[in-house]
Image (cartoon, rainbow, N blue to C red):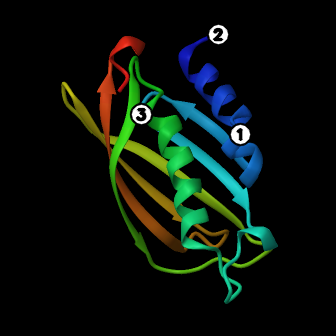
Amino acid sequence: MDRCKEIKQRFNECNVSTLLGITIDHVEEGLARGRMAVTRDHTNVFGGIHGGILFAFADQVGGACGNSMDYRALLVESVARFKKTAREGEVIYAEARLVHSRKKVDRIEITVTNGANEILATLKMTSLIVRNAAETP
């Protein structure tokens, strides 16, 4: 199995994806796309998607993107900008792109949108590049 197919399968079978209802639809080197239907369990006290759930969704798609390369990527820092909410019953989408890769770190940008292609959030994630499992902190 090629790396991108393996990453897609592993992230779709991951406990986080199962718990939150995340589907990773597409993975290629430096790019991943996913979706999630917002359920009542995802909402905050005001009926919008909880920021932590939205972040976890973006992080999962970003993780699939970062690990689509020939190394492991471990998140070390993230900045999220929340712009709009989503409600129960809506399907939200995320696209993660590798925008910068150096010897030790990479940078991934993630955009989360709704079905009308309105931006709900943007995230910038910095990951540590790990070439082999023995280096994993």
Outermost residue toward the front in this view: 137
Q: Residues within 10 Å of mark 3 (few under 14, many from 20)?
A: many
In terms of sequence position, does the residue under pointer 2 or pointer 3 come before the other? 2
Mark 3–mark 1 Cα distance, whole angstroms, equals: 23 Å
Mark 3 secondary-structure assignment: loop
Nearest to N terminus: mark 2 or mark 1: 2
Left or right: 34 in relation to 130: right
Measure the C-alpha gap from mark 2 to mark 3: 18 Å
Evaluate if marks 2 and 1 touch, with contact meaning CB atoms under 8 Å apart.
no
Disc number placed over residue 1 in the picture, else none: 2
Per the image, label 2 sits on a secondary structure element best described as: loop
Residue at the image position 35 percent from the left and 27 percent from the top: 137
Which residue lies under the disc numbered 3? 30
Residue at image mark 1:
15
Q: Amino acid at mark 2?
A: Met
- Residue 8 location, x and y as percent? 63, 30
Left or right: 40 as drawn, with respect to 123: right
Which sits in the foreground, 1 or 16? 16
The amino acid beneath tag 3 is Gly
| Mark 3 vs 1, N-terminal side | 1
Q: Position of residue 133 (x, y in %)?
A: 42, 14
What quarter of the picture does the N terminus occupy? top right
How packed mark 1 is, by other alpha carbons closer than 10 Å (few <14, some 14-19, many 20 or more), is few
